[in-house]
Amino acid sequence: MAHEDRNLPVWDPALRLFHWSLVACVVGAVVSVKIGGNAMRWHQGFGLAVLGLIVWRLQWGFVGPQTARFCAFVRGPREILAYVRGQWHGVGHNPLGALSVLALLGLFGLQALLGLFTYDEIAFRGPLATLVDSYWQIRLTHWHRMLEPLLWLIVLLHVGAIVFYAVVKKEDLVRPMITGYRPLPEGLAEVPRVQWDNKSYLLRLALTVAVALAVVYLASGVWIPAPTPVAPTPGMDW
């Protein structure tokens, strides 16, 4: 059977929603922090959303469809070298692109965690800042700011790789992340089974979303009791 004109299901709906939601939340976080002031509350909200998305994606890397699972695309040096030599054929993330995925998940997850404990020494504190002393609030805020250039670098590399594929390899990586489908690559011997139209998919999706929401709730700090207000010192009765 000729496969050249077939479209393969590659990215399931939940994974595509994660991808574009993460893009939107990162943009929102950057814009809000640059505005500052009252927009910092929005920055906090976007940061919590990023944390929830990362938690969900980590789970989906183990229970999601085949192309979403880490075991399907995270490879060792031998496979990466084979890809560089043009000897790798597959769908989904390639062995080299897998490194970009892991870097993005790790760095954005770390940035979101650090943001929970930040303090700008003026008025804004992260939702869990009161759980650590002032020294660590300042320390973690410093790391939160120092990590930003590294995040810009990994994002630029990610976008640069997409442009490289589009211009040099004539391969559109954006459209499959919108539609979920891509043409069957040449030299692919085995067609992966990527299904998202069954009850098992919906059940796994519901459970992973529930865990991610629980983590966001805990990270929001709403469960931390408000500090007891200090009673005013009574004036001296003359």
Image (cartoon, grey):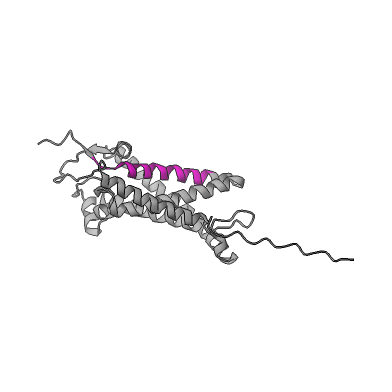
Where is residue 172 drawn, in percent x and y? 29, 37
Question: Residue 19, can we see it?
Answer: yes
Specify the farthest residue to the right: 238
Q: Is residue 17 magenta?
A: yes
Write the start and end of the magenta stretch as one range. Answer: 9-31
Main SS of the magenta segment? helix
Quarter of the C terminus within the rendering: bottom right
Residue at 70 percent across and 62 percent down: it is: 230
Horizontal side of 104 relative to 180 (left or right) equals right
Horizontal side of 46 relative to 9 (left or right) equals right
Residue at 75 percent across and 62 percent down: it is: 232
The number of numbered badges drawn on the structure is 0
Question: Which corner quadrant of the image does residue 55 belong to?
Answer: bottom left
Where is residue 73 drawn, in percent x and y? 26, 52
Quarter of the N terminus within the rendering: top left
Where is residue 65 drawn, in percent x and y? 26, 48
Horizontal side of 198 relative to 36 (left or right) equals left
Q: Nearer the viewer, residue 76 or 105?
A: 105
Where is residue 204 drawn, in percent x and y? 31, 50
Residue at 62 percent across and 47 percent down: it is: 37
Question: Residue 146, can we see it?
Answer: no
Specify the farthest residue to the left: 1
Horizontal side of 64 relative to 23 (left or right) equals left
Q: Nearer the viewer, residue 190 or 14?
A: 14
Q: Nearer the viewer, residue 22 or 222?
A: 222
Q: Is residue 135 magenta?
A: no
Q: Nearer the viewer, residue 99 or 42?
A: 42
Residue at 19 percent across and 41 percent down: it is: 185
